[in-house]
Image (tube, rainbow, N blue to C red):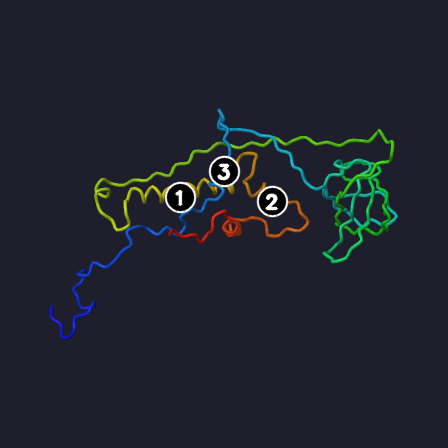
Amino acid sequence: MYFAGLRGTGSFGADERPKSFREMILWMNPNGTAPLFALTSKGKTEPVDDPQFYWWEEMQTICRLQASDNIASNEETITISAGDALELIPGDILQVEPATEVTSYVPELIRVKSVTSATEFEAERGVAGTTAATITKDGWLTRVGNAQSEGNLSVSSSSQNPVKLTNYTQIFKTPYQISKSALATKFRTGDPKKNEQKRKSFQHAEKSDQTPLWARGVITSALVYFIARSMPCRTRFRPPATPTTWPCWRRRSSPWPYTSRPR
């Protein structure tokens, strides 16, 4: 094929210029997208001899109780709708939380006199120099201490039992196949077998990472359930984990930058 004028880089025949390629794949997430799988791989392992296994769990949380109704300043019977009054013992000091976040607040302190049931207890109002005030419905009481009289040797106790939980072991398989002809072929992206192994290792890790988050056993729930249950705080800094919000939060909290690139 003829052409007139100066020959430039664009006037050569098709595929006549070999051009330049980076002889590898630029993996956009070289560390993978499975931080939970990576972190747990650093922990200790304990083998089991049955596909179903059990463990005992006991939560240690701040004691918070929610009033079931408005409680006048002169009332000493406290009825709650959330929390467990059996966690209290005589002498426990509870602080009445403000209904809204404020910069200046002098809370009322109340002292537990006796515990009637899981939803009711008797209390001394306005102790330690504080002023008794109406506790609004759904208001929260937080245990902030305990005060006993000198020489008091008989104090009622309270305890709790651990909860038995169960889950199952799981088999993960992420196979790959490549022909001998493909193995003998030169690719600009490098060794096809090594690339396929790496590609599948990312997928395998992702499956292992997602399963404990969302999968469900007979009795236990997924990890997101334990995360939500372990955050009984008054103020939640983020919405509950969902299939939509969790991947975004996981990327922000990953021990490896989400935008990491190979050099």
Q: Earlier in the sequence, mark 3 or mark 2?
A: 3
Please rate how many residues cluster around mark 2, counting C-alpha atoms within 10 Å: few if below 14, some from 14 to 19, many from 20: some
- Image quadrant for the N terminus? bottom left
- Say left or right for 255 vs 177: right
Which mark, residue 228? 2
Q: Earlier in the sequence, mark 1 or mark 3?
A: 3
Q: Looking at the image, do the residues carrying marks 1 and 3 touch, with CB atoms under 8 Å apart?
A: no
The amino acid sitting under disc 3 is Thr
Mark 3 against mark 2, which lies toward the viewer?
3
**Up-down: is 215 above or below 260?**
above
Which mark, residue 203? 1
**Up-down: is 22 above or below 211?**
below
Q: Position of residue 57 (x, y in %)?
A: 62, 33
Q: Earlier in the sequence, mark 1 or mark 2?
A: 1
- Say left or right for 142 vs 168: right
Q: Position of residue 205 (x, y in %)?
A: 43, 41
Q: Secondary structure at mark 1?
A: helix
Image point (72%, 41%), residue name: 63
Image point (56%, 48%), residue name: 241
**Up-down: is 6 above or below 97?**
below
- Say left or right for 247 vs 178: right
In space, the residues marked 3 and 2 are separated at their CA atoms by 20 Å
In space, the residues marked 1 and 3 are separated at their CA atoms by 17 Å
Please rate how many residues cluster around mark 1, counting C-alpha atoms within 10 Å: few if below 14, some from 14 to 19, many from 20: some
The amino acid sitting under disc 1 is Gln
In space, the residues marked 1 and 2 are separated at their CA atoms by 27 Å
Image point (16%, 73%), residue name: 6
Give the residue number, with chain letter if any, for mark 3: 40
- Say left or right for 219 vs 90: left
Image point (56%, 36%), residue name: 220
Depth check: 106 or 206 in front?
106
The amino acid sitting under disc 2 is Ala
